[in-house]
Image (cartoon, rainbow, N blue to C red):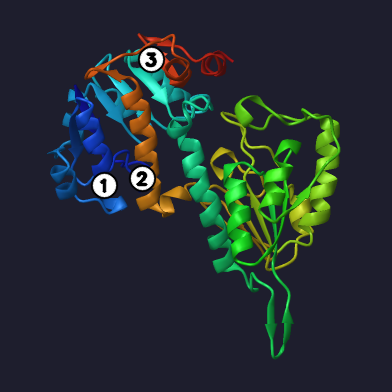
Amino acid sequence: MYLAIPKEDINNESRVAATPGTVKELISAGLDVYVETEAGSKSYISDKEYEEAGANIIGSGNEILSQADIIIKVLPPSVEQVSQIKPNAIVISLCQTTRELDIVKAMRDRSLTSLSMHLVPRTTLAQKMDALSSQANIAGYKAVLMAASKLSVYMPLLMTAAGTIRPAKVLILGAGVAGLQAIATAKRLGAHVEAFDVRPVVKEQVESLGAKFIEVDSSGDEGVGEGGYAKETSDDYKQRQQQLIHEHISKADVVITTALIPGKPAPILIPTSMVDAMKPGSIVMDLASENGGNCELTQKDEVIDYNGVTIDGTSNIPGTMPVHASELYAKNITALLTYMIKDGQLDLDLEDEIISGSMYTHNGEITHEQTKDALTG
């Protein structure tokens, strides 16, 4: 089967869906691998390295799309690119299917079988396929470094001849994969770290990393969704949450927000009134900017100054570390693909939880219920 790795040419995406190491795995699984020229250049992978791994280099993006039986990408293909893909081909990418509806419709109308790395079930068996976690881990780490580079104060406590320098105060909203990595990184830099999450079950993890957990009294399942994700909370909870965050945010030097609900607009955790209470020179790193942001003032892919407070809405932070981001994503997508290959042939078992859970179009139909509801709603 002809597997294509096109060049990512949308939104200056620097990651790539395969590395020379995963190309070897895909060839061992029985696939013929074709890579568009310079597909890995922004991740510092040369065409020669792909060739040495056994891939064929193709100069034309149109050719690679039109010939492929399977296409793996980071971002989903554009509507124009979808029109070049042959019917019944398989496309695997990071697609927010309830938000990128034009692409979903184009996939359906082209009778493509489409799988999204966003939809991979959070189960033990699918852990090595969890691209959201692998990329969030990078985002949490790099966000702290980006904030530290902009900050006008030291991160650690310092004892100097001129006197004692207090540590920076870092507040992290959301203690999922990105939040926990941000906590660990900020602690390694010596900051005083506090963290908030709607899920009380993460308290132990936060405290094990040396951070203080900020807790809103609530029922045990408030904010706890399926698969470990957060879910919407009650209005009463939101009001008490806002009061508590306001109290802590006014003292913070850095605030890192990571709260994302899959397929939905990011919840607003920091309204303008809270930013007004922040100290001049403080920084908000909004890791939810791709879905609108957790801060009311966040502008996607913009760094703005609001009364002396810096609000960074960089949406593709993993893309700022393309070598490791590509390496991890390539392993995730290869794990999913090889899981579906039996004896060199693709086996789309629609009864399989991982395959059916990741799929959103097949045989001219939208198969993912939430995506179908978003399209009709």
Label 3 secondary element: helix
Residue receiving disc 2:
326
Query: Image quarter for residue 3?
Result: top left
Whole-Å distance between the Cαs marked 2 and 3?
28 Å
Relative to 115, does residue 287 appear above or below in the rendering? Answer: below
> Which residue does the numbered mark 1 point to in the structure image?
40
Q: Which mark is residue 185?
A: none
Question: Do labels 1 and 2 touch, CB within 8 Å?
Answer: yes
246 left or right, relative to 151: right
Mark 1 vs 3, N-terminal side:
1
The quarter of the picture where the N terminus appears is top left
Nearer the camera: disc 1 or disc 3? 1
Q: How many marks?
A: 3
| Disc 1/disc 3 C-alpha distance (Å) | 29 Å
Residue 101 on image: x %, y %:
47, 23
280 over 373 or under it: above or below: below
Query: Which residue corresponds to the image point at 44% horizontal and 34% vertical from the top-left?
Result: 128
Discs 1/2, front: 2
Query: Which three-letter amino acid code belongs to the residue tagged 3?
Result: Arg
Task: Name which quarter of the figure residue 340 lies in.
Answer: top left
Visible residue check, residue 11: no
Q: Is residue 38 above or below residue 231?
A: below
Query: The residue under label 1 is which amino acid type?
Result: Gly
Q: Is residue 240 above or below residue 232?
A: below
Q: Check the image and name the residue furthest to the bottom.
A: 161
The residue labelled by disc 3 is 108
